[in-house]
Amino acid sequence: MKSATSAAIATLVLSSFSWAANDAFDKGMKAISARDYPAGLSLLESALTQEPDNLQFGSEYRQAILKYARKIHPKEGQPADFDRSLKFFEGLMAKNAGAANGWLNFGFAVVDKIPAAGAISQVILANSALSYFTKSIEAKPSWIAYYTRGVSYLFWPKIFGRAPLAVADLELAMKMQKTLPPRGIYVRGYVALGDAYWKNDELDKARAMWSEGLKLFPDSTQLKDRLAKQGDDLKTYLDDVMDPSKRVDTDLKDLWTTK
Amino acid sequence: MTKPIFKRAMRAGAVALPLGLAAWSGVPAVIHFTEIGAQAGVRAQHHTRHYEGKHGDVLRMFTSGGAAAAVGDYDNDGFDDLFVTDSDRGKPNHLYHNNGNFTFTDVAVEAGVAGGNDPLSIVADAVWFDYDNDGREDLLVARFGTPILYHNEGNGKFRDVSKQAGLTKFGNTIAAIAFDYDNDGYLDLMLGNYFKPVNLLDLKDPHVLPNDLDNAVNGGGVTLWHNTGKGSFVEVTEKAGFGKHTGWTLDLGHGDFNNDGFQDVYLACDYGTDRIFFNNGDGTFRDTTEKSIGFDTRKGMNVDVGDYDNDGWLDIYVTNITDEYMKECNMLWHNNHDGTFLDVSKETQTCATLWGWAAKFGDFDNDGWLDLFVVNGLRSAGKDNYIPVLMKMIITPGIDFTDVNNWPDIGSMSWSGYQKKKMFRNLSGQLFKEISAEAGVDNEMDGRGIAMGDFDNDGLLDFVQTNADQPALLYRGVTQGVGNWVEFRLTGTKSNRDAVGARIRITAGGLTQIREIDGGNGYAGQSMRRAHFGIGKAEQIDSVEISWPSGRKEKIAKTTINAINRIVEGQGIR
């Protein structure tokens, strides 16, 4: 009886907690839509504080930070515009080290700052982001975490020797996605693993991976573009894709909106 | 009466006349240069400074500039001479006297200008300017140390007058320009300082390096020195409004950016924000960086000023670092005519020039549009790459970048070396086309400075490229099928005698162009004082108007094309 009561109370507490978090999230998103960024960001932070492992809350919060930065400083914002989210996630993760999705969003928050930063700060930030993605994997291995860290390695010049690490992570992600129900988002796994093979000077494997992906996702322009290019054209194309100074789309919406 | 020596120069110009007139067909010429440094006798080997002690390797890496060249006709014989710096202890500078036949003779020792690399000072830049308006070019040698001002005695000799001129303040000066910021008829000096003012050769505290690699504010800033007109200079840095700038100044550029008759200033700063200052016309400047260009986090290396699109407003070209490891992109600041600038380097395809240093505008094919040459390359040494070694330090959490002890030695490693130089042909002010290989200038040396000149007075621009720890190169313009040209040598009377800041506006063949005489724009290189214009197939100049720093506006009649026109303020062509 005692334990059943405790469980019931716990369920009640958790559901009310979840309800409160969702309520804060919904209100926060409305405020952001109304361009009331200060109020909206506070509400989203409140939601995340209650559910630090909520991938959607974290992703929407980061997108709101980005919108606000661009509002204050057109184009990419200024580095300081992103410090609010970094400070918030730092505090959040200090108290919730087991929240794998929290680490993932922390890493993405760092990535979001990169285009606004100077060239050397970009390196420091990119390295920090990698460490947070690793913490996410350590907390709970997942397709999204391996995929994300693998792709992050691709943005490093070859001399740093991170292309083999990208291949390893993305091969794991591929292995995982092949055991999961098919979803449109998994086209990214084929694109990225092919890119990793290319960066690792394994062109045949790269083309094979892109071709395999195209059979499953015949409308993918990313795969078609890669397969249509050779030699220097392909290099120019992929160098541009992997240009660390360009903004990477870190909106995770596809994870809960695509089939 | 024309001076005999000037007649000699005119004769040289006349020799070139048939080439210019006969060759231009309206078809774009293939810009080409030939490197003739060795046969011309200007193959000066540069040496960066070696430091003693455990910090030595890192400090040497951080001060691997100092290879500079300055063009000036010190003996008024009508042929531009050349001063080339060295930087290691005891190494002499070079004063190359132009023999008039594209050979040069090093007369630095006899002239008394070879020194400067003493045990506690490093020569880093030089600028010719006639500070006392006596008609002879004097020489300022900028140092990591105190500057040296040499007075031109007029007999091939120079005298060190630094002390009596009041130029005794220590600074880690890497750039110097001479311009008349208050239009009082005397050239003032601005010194750009890289490190804060501590002597790196006698280092007491190792915390001297940038406190942030993208937003550093612990550099040497600039100092501004007002010419009293009595042979001395007085520091006016604070009074003029430059005191708050504490960045790592790497280059300085001046020009009248808003066409108000006063010289404005652009500061290129390593490890962070460039700065732009507009002249208030009352001896003070206002920092309009945020409004004019915004704050950047790049590695500003060079400032050159020119009207690349012939819209009558001066634009600014700044090099940064754009290579495999850093994607900063250069900045071609298009002047919006309202005190703001728009970076169009990507649109004009002048963004990526690797590890950029000096860049200079110049009309290399005399078609009426300013082309561009950019040098690059940090350190070409062994096959091992310093970047991964450096990266370990950079990503160490909480590392103190300012501490010399935290930086790894570079030893025999390379760092962004073996980079091909970039020359761009201006396609009518809309786009630039890279032509380095076909122009014959795609060398892989560790370039630093560029000094443009017309050393044989043939109307084709030549240039010197200085290189760190490597010999200098002299490129002679040999482009065939070029357009006609005209050069102006101005002498101020009420204005400063060098006419720095004077603006020349010409119209020929339906195209209006401007040039402003500058006092040393561009990293580690001062170009010739003469203004050079290409005019394409035009066979006459329709109008010439000069706006002198004194405020006088003067229309010049009877300009001769394919020749050097000498103009004295208020007296027209002489």
Image: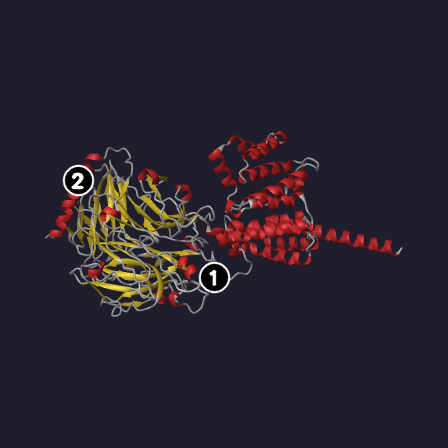
The answer to whether residue B303 of the structure is visible from this angle is yes
Q: Would residue B120 appear left or right of A16 to someone viewing this image?
A: left
Q: Residue at x 86, y 53 (%)?
A: A4
**Residue B36 in picture, x, y percent from top left:** 25, 45
Viewer-nearest of labels 2 and 1?
1
- The answer to whether A140 appears left or right of B478 in the picture is right
Residue linked to disc 2: B17
Q: Name the residue under label 1.
A: B211
- Residue B535, quarter of picture: top left
Residue B255 image offset from top left, x and y in percent: 31, 54
| Residue type at numbered disc 1 | Asn
Q: Is mark 1 on a helix, strand or loop?
A: loop
Question: What kind of residue is marked 2?
Answer: Leu
Residue A35, image x, y percentages:
58, 50
Do marks 2 and 1 both belong to one polypeptide chain? yes
Mark 2 and mark 1 residues within 8 Å of each other at the beta carbon: no
Q: Quadrant of residue A256?
A: top right
Q: Which chain carries label 1?
A: B
Q: Which residue lies furthest to the right in this view?
A: A1
Relative depth, front residue between B234 and B374: B374
